[in-house]
Image: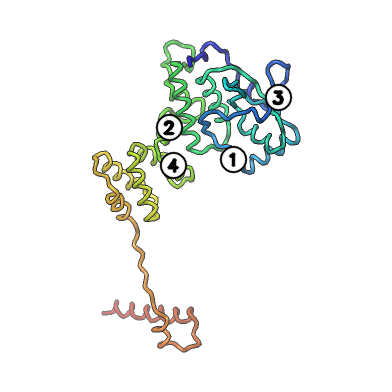
C-alpha cells in the first residue's frame, strides 16, 4: 500500500494522547463496540493483567475513557486498533460494551508509526517490546522514503531512519536503536533472558544476535544444563568460534565450563563420626570439636 503520510498534516501527540478529556463533536469520535475491535497486526507491546491494568480498569469503570483511542476501518469489517490496546482491554475488564475512538483511514506505514510512537510514551517497556517496535517503525520509515532535518537549515545533515527513531523514543543514538532491533534475531528463550535482565541487551546484541538459530539453540541447551549465564568474555569467545564456522555444542560447553568455580565438598558419614563422640553430642557440637582439632593440626603444620 502506497504511503500517504507525506500528504497528511498529523496532529500533535498532545492533541491525540493528552490527558484532557476529548471533545466529541459528533464527527471524529465514535463509540465502537468492543466486539468490533481487532488488535494491530503483529502488535509488539504486551497488554498485561498487572496492577497498572487493574488501576486502569478501575478508573475506566469510574470515569470512563477520557482519551479516545485511534482506529482504522478494516476492509473485512470492524476496526483495527492503532492506539488504545490497553484502554480497550481495561474497558473490557470494567464491563464496558463500547469505547471512544478517533476513526481514520490510513495506510500501513502511517498506522505503524502512530502505533509505535503512542506506545513509546509508556514508562516501562521490555527490551523485546522496544526491539520489535523499533523494527516495525524502521521498515515503515524506509517504505515512506522520508528523511527529516533537526532544523530547517539546508546545511544541517539529514537524520537517518534510525536516528529519527532514537530522537522520537528518547534513545541516546541510532546505534542504540540498532542494538535493540538486533534482538529480534534472538530465539525466544534468549530474548526472554534479556527481558528478565539476566542477559544484558548489549551482550545479547553484540555477541549472540548474529549467530545462526541452531547455534543459539545449542547455547541455550548448554546454559540450561550447566545452570550458568555466560559473561561477556565467554560470549566473545563463542562469537569468534561462530564466525570461524567451528562452533559446536561441545565447544560451548568447554567455554562455559572453564570459568566455573569448582566447589569442594567433603562428606563425613554420621556412622563413622558417632564412634568418636558421646551419644549426647549434637551435630553443632561435633562440628565445633572437628574444626578445633583441624586448627590445631594446621598450627602444627606451620611449625614443621
The disc placed on residue 188 is 4
Please tell me which of labels 3 and 4 falls first in the chain: 3
Residue 256 pos. (x, y %) = 32, 52
Residue 182, relative to residue 12: is it above or below? below
Q: For residue 266, what is the image quadrant?
A: bottom left
Do labels 4 and 1 touch, CB within 8 Å? no
User: Sequence order check: which comes first, mark 1 or mark 2?
Assistant: 1
Which label lies toward us, 4 or 2? 4
Q: Position of residue 137 (x, y in %)?
A: 48, 25
Q: SS of the residue at dot 3?
A: strand
Are the residues at dot 3 and dot 1 in contact (C-beta closer than 8 Å)? no
For residue 48, the mark is 1
Q: Earlier in the sequence, mark 4 or mark 2?
A: 2
Front tag of 1 and 2: 1
Foreground residue, 17 or 159?
Answer: 17
Quarter where residue 273 is shown? bottom left
Cα distance, mark 3 to mark 2? 36 Å
| Depicted 183 relative to depicted 252: above or below | above
Residue topped by disc 2 = 181
In which quadrant of the rendered view does residue 145 lie?
A: top left
The CA distance from mark 3 to mark 1 is 24 Å
Q: Which residue is mark 3?
A: 31
Amino acid at each position: 500500500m502506497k504511503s500517504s503520510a507525506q500528504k497528511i498534516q498529523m496532529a500533535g501527540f498532545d492533541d491525540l494522547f493528552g490527558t484532557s478529556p476529548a471533545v466529541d463533536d459528533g464527527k471524529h469520535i465514535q463509540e465502537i463496540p468492543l466486539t468490533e475491535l481487532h488488535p494491530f497486526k503483529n502488535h509488539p507491546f504486551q497488554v498485561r493483567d498487572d496492577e497498572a491494568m487493574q488501576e486502569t480498569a478501575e478508573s475506566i469503570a469510574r470515569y470512563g475513557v477520557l482519551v479516545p483511542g485511534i482506529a482504522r476501518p478494516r476492509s473485512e469489517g470492524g476496526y483495527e486498533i492503532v492506539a488504545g490496546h490497553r484502554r480497550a482491554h481495561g474497558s473490557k475488564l470494567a464491563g464496558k460494551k463500547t469505547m471512544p475512538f478517533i476513526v481514520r483511514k490510513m495506510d500501513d506505514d502511517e498506522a505503524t508509526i502512530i502505533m509505535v510512537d503512542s506506545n513509546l510514551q509508556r514508562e516501562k517497556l521490555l527490551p523485546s517490546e522496544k526491539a520489535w517496535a523499533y523494527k516495525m517503525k524502521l521498515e515503515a520509515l524506509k517504505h515512506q522514503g522520508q528523511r527529516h532535518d533537526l532544523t530547517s537549515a539546508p546545511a544541517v545533515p539529514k537524520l537517518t531512519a534510525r536516528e529519527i527513531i532514537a530522537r522520537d523514543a528518547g534513545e541516546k543514538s541510532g546505534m542504540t536503536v540498532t542494538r535493540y532491533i538486533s534482538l529480534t534475531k534472538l530465539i525466544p528463550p534468549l530474548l526472554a533472558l534479556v527481558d528478565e535482565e539476566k542477559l544484558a541487551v548489549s551482550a545479547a546484541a553484540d555477541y549472540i544476535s548474529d549467530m545462526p538459530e541452531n547455534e543459539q539453540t545449542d547455547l541455550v541447551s548448554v546454559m540450561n544444563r550447566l545452570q550458568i549465564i555466560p559473561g561477556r568474555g565467554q560470549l566473545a569467545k563463542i562469537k569468534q568460534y561462530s564466525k570461524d564456522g567451528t562452533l559446536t555444542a561441545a565447544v560451548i560447553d568447554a567455554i562455559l565450563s572453564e570459568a566455573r568455580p569448582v566447589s569442594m565438598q567433603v562428606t563425613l558419614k554420621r556412622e563413622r563420626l558417632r564412634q568418636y563422640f558421646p551419644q549426647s553430642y549434637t551435630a553443632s557440637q561435633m562440628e565445633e570439636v572437628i574444626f578445633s582439632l583441624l586448627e590445631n593440626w594446621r598450627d602444627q603444620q606451620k611449625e614443621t
